[in-house]
Image (spheres, coloured by chain):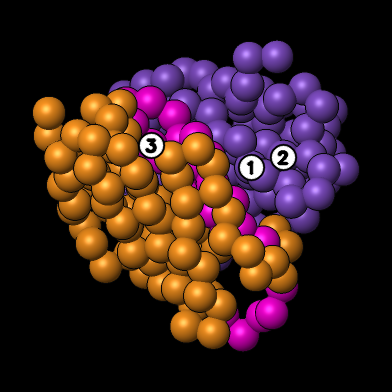
Amino acid sequence: AQTVTQSQPEMSVQEAETVTLSCTYDTSESDYYLFWYKQPPSRQMILVIRQEAYKQQNATENRFSVNFQKAAKSFSLKISDSQLGDAAMYFCAYRKDNDMRFGAGTRLTVKP
Amino acid sequence: DTGVSQNPRHKITKRGQNVTFRCDPISEHNRLYWYRQTLGQGPEFLTYFQNEAQLEKSRLLSDRFSAERPKGSFSTLEIQRTEQGDSAMYLCASSSALVLQETQYFGPGTRLLVL
């Protein structure tokens, strides 16, 4: 079974600094998708960034970028120039066909 | 389109009662998913529809749970004879099979508390 592990239950970053959230996953598949979702307090989950496993190039969305290491089955999220609005739970997710698995999440606090 | 909507947003019920939640997906999306999220955890897959057909169910979906999507648009999730362990956030997501990468877009969830 595919599992997704987020080893950092909580992280903290100073406003304008950079933070990296870790995610590892377990799979025997070669083609799949990886996602980072953000869930602000009492608000709905929104997609932050997406990576296709067949692409070697790391995905980037403005201040958000990933470090995808396929062989190591690692998919970390880097948030640059952190803003107060980045404070949220961040979930790493793996998807193969219609099987979507989430990690337990990392709570990110942004200090002003 | 304003995205995926779910109703009600909150539900408090007594143990043993039945509850029903509704999800309205993004209008052009033909795939719809239900997840359960307990406190401090990520969402866990419950079931999945493509159009009106329920194609997959998790073992988490006991006999007390039933989901429908009668016309391939909105979906309902019913829990019969609720138990305290059913207390959780129930999330709905939708996606389009016609779009490469097929990102799932989530609704705000229905938070259920069983007393």
Q: Amino acid at mark 1?
A: Gln
Please determine whether, in this image, residue B25 is positioned above or below residue A56: above
Supply the letter of whichever chain is orange: A
Q: Residue B11: x and y, percent?
A: 37, 23
In this rendering, would A74 be left or right of A18? Answer: right
Q: Is residue B34 visible?
A: yes
Q: Residue at x 63, y 14 (%)?
A: B2
Q: CA distance from mark 3 to mark 1?
A: 14 Å
The chain letter under disc 1 is: B
Which residue does the numbered mark 2 point to in the structure image?
A: B95
- Establish whether labels 2 and 1 are both on one chain: yes
Contact, mark 2 vs mark 1 (Cβ under 8 Å): yes
SS type, badge 2: strand
Q: Which mark is residue B81?
A: none
Q: Residue at x 54, y 84 (%)?
A: A71
In this rendering, would B53 be left or right of B111? Answer: right
Q: Residue at x 31, y 38 (%)?
A: A81
Badge 1 crowding class, 10 Å Cα cut-off, few under 14, some 14 to 19, many 20 or more, is: some
Residue lying at the far right in this picture: please name it: B98
SS type, badge 3: strand
The chain letter under disc 3 is: A
Q: Which mark is residue B104?
A: 1
Q: Amino acid at mark 2?
A: Ser
Supply the letter of whichever chain is purple: B
Q: Is residue A34 magenta?
A: yes
Which residue does the numbered mark 3 point to in the structure image?
A: A39
| Magenta stretch, residue numbers | A27-53
In this rendering, would A50 be left or right of A98? Answer: left
